[in-house]
Image (cartoon, rainbow, N blue to C red):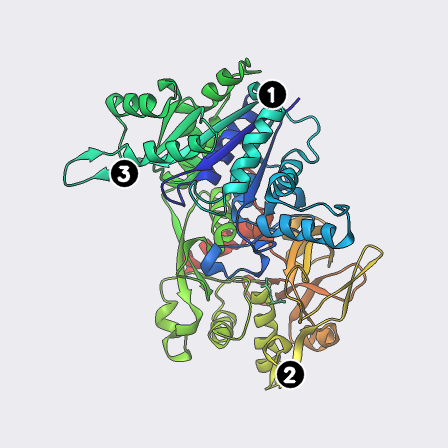
Amino acid sequence: MARYVFVTGGVVSSLGKGLSSASLAALLQLRGFKVRIRKLDPYLNVDPGTMNPFQHGEVFVTDDGAETDLDIGHYERFTGISATKSDNITTGGIYSDIIKKERKGDYLGGTVQVVPHVTDRIKKFISHDIKNEDFVICEIGGTVGDIESLPFLEAIRQFSNDIDKKNSLFIHLTLVPYMKASGELKTKPTQHSVKELRSLGIQPDIIICRSEKKIPISERKKISLFCNVNIENVIETIDVKTIYEAPISFHKEKLDDRVLSQFNIKSKKYPNLTKWKNITSKILNSKKDVNIGIIGKYVNLKDAYKSLDEALIHGGISNNLKVNLTRIDSENLKIQNLKSLLKDVSGVLIPGGFGKRGSEGKIAAIKYARLNNIPFFGICFGMQMAVIEAARNLLKIKDASTSEFGNNCTPVVGLLEEWQKGKKIFKGSEKNLGGTMRLGLYEAILKSNSLISKIYSMKKIKERHRHRYEVNIKYKKEFEKKGLIFSALSPDGMLPEIIELQNHPWFVGVQFHPEFRSKPFTPHPLFSSFVKAVAINKRKH
Ligand code: GLN
């Protein structure tokens, strides 16, 4: 039977619960165990798909088309296990299920309540589809003390009782702040947070203390005493230079040891962290570097393009290069300042995006990259903007645009009424924004002898999608005459999946999001190839 590890957080948000959970999972894997990680999010959106990246960071898409929290991306990158729809749930998702059932009359006239109906639904999610896993690590989003978290905390308390307490474990992550004025680390916020958790019936077994300084034994003793936790189970986590150092640092702190010993389980093997050490050293010690400009709308929030940033780092790992990212706000980008804003970068990347704001800046940057032989990588919206730029300047369709910005244009990018996925007809819609995009893994057939077929060394690929609009196939011939090749199409030949420009060092647009499938140990070929092209361009100048 699977053992369940619940990870909660206290004091403040953004302490790194996701990375701690992912690191623990990676360490248990290295010890020979089968793990699964999932996340419960307390907000009321049914999924993060409709949330602005400014609010919530990136929306991570799974193979099966779920729009999930960005922590799911960390889980995949750290464990290599593809997440599914059943690995992330929100309060909104739970309530919408319950309300649907209630409307159908499934509760047979009963009163529907938080306890037991909501908590039962949460418990069902936690153990759903768990088969032969040794460990299920379950992260609870938010912070203990939030009103929204209560049903989740109650559910995990009940769950632990239901499965017999010895098969579950509670880890609580808190902040131990350093007070500069007095030169002290403060344990009181941790004590209060644990007190709050205990008042809800949950006694943490392990406390992970996030701190900017090493926590001395005296402070650990205090936390152990006041929080009723064995001193060996008070674990510190100090900021790391790269997230891939986190499993190494948690192992040094014996997190995996302590978890196994709480469960009274012997390790299947001693964890070999060499591969983690290797990538960490490549990221931190590579002598050569490249600068890549990411032009987008959400450049002020670090987490808005999380998977993309990571995929570029992975591309750096495969080329033994450090990748520096310069974020450029597309709204500030004008033809007049393009040259100066792009002067220090050797490659340009335009990521996924939505809406008209900032799009003209992106189009201007694409033109600049196209004409000046600067490696260009357009992802989803980035590819659509590249097609619009080419339509305006190569095909001379002056009003070429996307119907996403309104109907007052020649839509070289437009809304398709129907997409085919297997035998099911999928209807896209502009009216209903939640979950109505072309989402998840779709197949594409690569054109032989193209740059892209060399990059992938494959004929067919599957990549994750998240978009509503498509490049209109009817312009294919005209574009190809001008050297813009549609080098991958959907199997039915209707949907352009990849474009590439001939007679340019590296100019590729993809309708999907390759960043979601890149892993530190298996960098995505598109990112490896792009970073390589950027490095070649740097050497030339
Ligand atoms: N807004 C575009 C669409 O919906 C692109 C989406 C994206 O970049 N993920 O088609």
Q: Position of residue 200 (x, y in %)?
A: 47, 33
Residue at mark 3 to residue at mark 1: CA–CA distance: 35 Å
Q: Nearer the viewer, residue 258 or 333?
A: 258
Please, what is the three-letter code of the amino acid marked with disc 3?
Pro
Identify the mark at residue 319; answer none if there is no mark: none
For disc 3, the marked residue is: 177
Q: Position of residue 514 (x, y in %)?
A: 60, 53
Q: Position of residue 89 (x, y in %)?
A: 60, 46
Q: Nearer the viewer, residue 471 or 426?
A: 426
Q: Residue 54: which quarter of the image?
A: bottom left
The answer to whether residue 46 shows anywhere in this view is: yes
- Under circle 3, the secondary element is loop
For disc 1, the marked residue is: 164
Please, what is the three-letter code of the amino acid marked with disc 2?
Asn
Q: Is residue 362 above or below residue 200?
A: below
Q: Are marks 3 and 1 in contact (CB under 8 Å)?
A: no
Q: Nearer the viewer, residue 35 or 367?
A: 35
Give the mark, 3 or 2, whose residue is nearer the N terminus. 3
Give the mark, 1 or 2, whose residue is nearer the N terminus. 1
- Under circle 1, the secondary element is loop
Identify the mark at residue 407; answer none if there is no mark: 2
Q: Is residue 40 left or right of residue 450?
A: left
Identify the residue at image location x=52%, y=37%. Answer: 153
Indicate if the residue with disc 1 has its beta carbon within 8 Å of ligand 1: no
